[in-house]
Image (cartoon, rainbow, N blue to C red):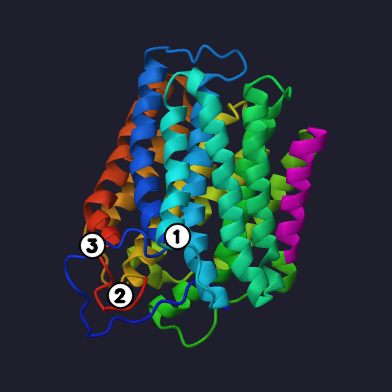
Amino acid sequence: MTLLTIQPPSSKKAPAKRFALFNLGFRPFFLGGALFAILSILLWMHRFFSAQALTLATVTPSQWHAHEMLYGYGLAIIAGFLLTAVRNWTGVPTAHGKALAALFALWMWARLLMALPIQYWQFAAGLDVLFNLGLLVAVAIPIVQAKQWRQIAVVSKVMLLGVGNALFYLGAFGAFNGGVMVSQTLALLLILSLILVIGRRVIPFFIERGLGLTGNLVQYKWLDVSIMVLFLVWLLDEMAFRSGAVSAWACGGLFLLNGFRLRNWYHRGIWKVPLLWSLYLASWSINFGFLFYALKEVLAVSITLPIHMFTIGGIGLITLAMMARVSLGHTGRNIHQPPRTISAVFVLLLLSMVFRAVLPMLSASFYRYGLIIGAVCWVLGFAIFLMNYAAVLVKPRIDGQPG
């Protein structure tokens, strides 16, 4: 079963001037998430270079930045994707109209308040927790109604992300020691696990369909199970035992096994299709993140460098690639004819990862310049995406179909 069934464009035209932002979940959350990706990085860079403190002893500016990228940007894109995919999985309508607008408003106001001085964070916490609960309910109800119990694993990850977000606020307000660190580690690993699970379903399918392959790409059940077992070992060690050595060996194994799986998905034809090579390179960015995470002690590099391979080249690029594809397909447009500038968007995200994560590994002198250039590439990439897709996300489907 595929994750998103995209109908081919038809000749039927929808009215040209209707506002469709809250017709389906991907629309507001992709638009809001992309805009937030720009604004939050600009604010982070201002705080970083002005050494602006948050005047909160339990949260550093870097931890605020990590929280907003994982639970702000990351969870917004997950929300938009799942609210769209669950409708396709189950045939049951997901939140739309006023319900979707209310859910989006909770996310948006929480982000705005988190950008303000810390006296507003209690209000942000309340809204953020309500958003997490609302998303959980919106995703779970259609799955339960359709009795698609195999999707409960996805629901459980959404629930755990909500728990992790609550732990951040408990840690920030001094109610749970270590809550901030636990929250951010949990979010990173949960989002990566979602990408591995969803990527296993959709990336080979997209490659086969996109290239018109007559035979299926090689898939091994034992390989998928082994990868998830090693990932669970890594997660448990990071969350409970913190031995370091276990995580290193688990990530080394993940690099080898996931690399073998990605090799099985490879076809030289992907380099002609931006919506395919972007997904493939994002997957390899995550895989090299496993490698450098495993070797961080041997190479004596900061843990933030492999983390930014995971987050910029992995999460950032793969979410942009999925947004670019889903936004076309679910508005009745041809996914084989994306905007001409979409390749530049993906290249800019890759450059952002190189300057932020790779070059500082070679020399510490690259760090400050890499930070600046990486941020500029990130902002430009999302800005070009918005220039091409903002109108697509706001206007009705061109084929007159609902959604």
Where is 138 relative to 255, above or below? below
Is residue 32 toward the left or the right of residue 71 in the image?
left
Residue 400 x, y percent position in the rendering: 27, 78
**What mark, if any, has residue 332 been given in the picture?**
2
Gap between marks 2 and 3 measured at Cα: 14 Å
Which quadrant is home to the N terminus?
A: bottom right
Is residue 158 toward the left or the right of residue 11 in the image?
right
Nearest to the eye among marks 1 and 3: give it: 3
Nearest to the eye among marks 2 and 1: give it: 2
Q: Circle 2: is it few (<14), some (14-19), or many (20+) Cα within 10 Å?
A: many
- Residue extending farthest to the left is 16
Determine whether the residue tagged by mark 2 lies in a helix, strand or loop: loop
- Of the numbered discs 2 and 3, the one sitting upstream in the chain is 2
Determine whether the residue tagged by mark 3 lies in a helix, strand or loop: loop
- Of the numbered discs 1 and 3, the one sitting upstream in the chain is 1
**Location of mark 3 (residue):** 339
Looking at the rendering, the stretch of residues picked out in magenta corresponds to 225-243
Q: Name which quarter of the figure residue 13 lies in.
A: bottom left
Residue 27 x, y percent position in the rendering: 36, 58
- Of the numbered discs 2 and 1, the one sitting upstream in the chain is 1
Which quadrant is home to the C terminus?
A: bottom left
Gap between marks 2 and 1 measured at Cα: 21 Å
Front-most of 374 and 192?
192
Determine whether the residue tagged by mark 1 lies in a helix, strand or loop: helix
Amino acid carrying label 2: it is Gly
**Location of mark 1 (residue):** 279
Magenta residue check for 356: no
Which residue appears at 56% of the width and 32% of the height? 125
Residue 363 x, y percent position in the rendering: 47, 24
Amino acid carrying label 1: it is Leu
- Residue extending farthest to the bottom is 214
Tell me whether the residue at label 2 lies in contact with that at label 1, contact meaning CB atoms closer than 8 angstroms. Answer: no
